[in-house]
């Protein structure tokens, strides 16, 4: 699987499916002002000036394809939820892509200076931090949905895997509304973590790597990107493989894929209606 297709399919969802990115001047983000932006910048340990410059550089050079908030568009992946961006430290993973582009995948080489690259990296780090840390938000009332509509949505979309009287029984009594919404939107608990709303969230992502010799190595996925894939087999032995295009063949099995597939389809009413329904499961 090519790099951009991989990022489009494998990402770590945030607490709320469609929250806007933090941008200069306090626009965008549930905080409704500069307080949340300041908290996100501080939490991400980024320079506020670099963040401001990065917002402008991103808008001028990247927003046309990846969207104004970095959440992707047709033909371009969601950057805020991509593993490459989430796993980046000091631009080690992001900078080479910004520096050289991916012409073979439809991303031309950007005409960016090293300072612009560093600033865009800072901006992206703040986006991923704000997406994954609810402490940067000033939340309002989450229970604004219609429980009856939420029940209808649940029966039409979720009932094949979940049961209100089975794995989700009593879930409304175990969590407050904010925590419950976060857990059903992000059943793993963030960045591949466990402890979600149902037993299925405890199942790890597995991968099978087929070498050119035909040998197959399977186990729990450790990391995957366009350049390498690593895993731990049933004996907890670590394996890492360099990737060159489609070689070796990599097949990923993610038990949470139905959830991640739905993240791009939920509307705001869907989210609030579902939460309103789930809190009734006492």
Image (tube, helix red, strand yellow):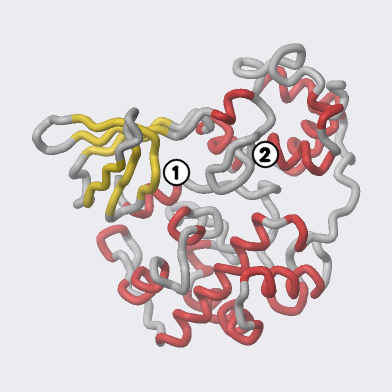
Pointers 1 and 2 in contact (CB under 8 A)? Answer: no
| Left or right, 122 with reference to 239 | right
Q: Where is residue 157 in the image (x, y as percent from the top left)?
A: 65, 23
In the displayed structure, 121 sits above or below 253; it is: below
Marks 1, 2: nearer the viewer: 2
- Residue that protrudes farthest toward the left in the picture: 213
| Secondary structure beneath label 1 | helix
Q: Where is residue 47 in the image (x, y as percent from the top left)?
A: 62, 82
Front one among 263 and 162? 162
The residue located at (9%, 34%) in the rendering is: 213
Q: Distance between the residues labelled 1 and 2?
A: 16 Å
Task: Find disc 2 in the rendering and name its residue.
Answer: 185
Quarter of the image containing the N terminus? Answer: top left
In the displayed structure, 234 sits above or below 229; it is: above
| Left or right, 173 with reference to 242 | right
Location of residue 106 (image quadrant) = bottom left
Location of residue 175 (image quadrant) = top right
The residue located at (21%, 44%) in the rendering is: 246
In the displayed structure, 130 sits above or below 159; it is: below
In the displayed structure, 61 sits above or below 265; it is: below
The residue located at (46%, 87%) in the rendering is: 115
Q: Which mark is residue 9?
A: 1
Neighbor class of circle 2 (other Cα within 10 Å; few <14, some 14-19, many 20+) is: many
| Secondary structure beneath label 2 | helix
Front one among 169 and 10? 169
């Amino acid at each position: 699987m090519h790099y951009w297709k991989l990022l489009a399919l494998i990402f770590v969802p945030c607490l709320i499916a469609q929250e806007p990115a933090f941008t200069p001047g306090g626009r965008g983000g549930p905080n409704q002002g500069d307080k949340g932006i300041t908290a996100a910048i501080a939490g991400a340990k980024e320079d506020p000036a670099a963040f401001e410059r990065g917002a402008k550089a991103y808008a001028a050079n990247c927003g046309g394809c990846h969207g104004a908030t970095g959440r992707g568009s047709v033909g371009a992946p969601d950057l805020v939820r991509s593993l490459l961006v989430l796993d980046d430290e000091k631009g080690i993973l992001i900078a080479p892509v910004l520096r050289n582009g991916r012409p073979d995948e439809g991303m031309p080489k950007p005409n960016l200076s090293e300072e612009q690259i560093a600033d865009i990296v800072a901006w992206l780090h703040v986006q991923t931090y704000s997406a994954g840390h609810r402490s940067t938000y000033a939340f309002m009332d989450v229970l604004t949905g219609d429980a009856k509509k939420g029940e209808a949505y649940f029966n039409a979309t979720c009932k094949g895997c979940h049961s209100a009287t089975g794995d989700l029984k009593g879930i409304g009594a175990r969590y407050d509304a904010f925590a419950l919404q976060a857990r059903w939107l992000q059943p793993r608990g963030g960045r591949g973590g466990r402890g979600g709303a149902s037993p299925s969230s405890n199942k790890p992502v597995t991968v099978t790597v087929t070498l050119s010799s035909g040998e197959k190595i399977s186990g729990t996925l450790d990391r995957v990107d366009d350049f390498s894939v690593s895993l731990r087999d049933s004996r907890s032995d670590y394996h890492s493989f360099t990737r060159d295009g489609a070689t070796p063949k990599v097949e990923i099995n993610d038990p949470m894929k139905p959830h991640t597939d739905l993240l791009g389809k939920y509307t705001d009413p869907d989210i609030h209606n579902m939460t309103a329904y789930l809190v009734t499961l006492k």
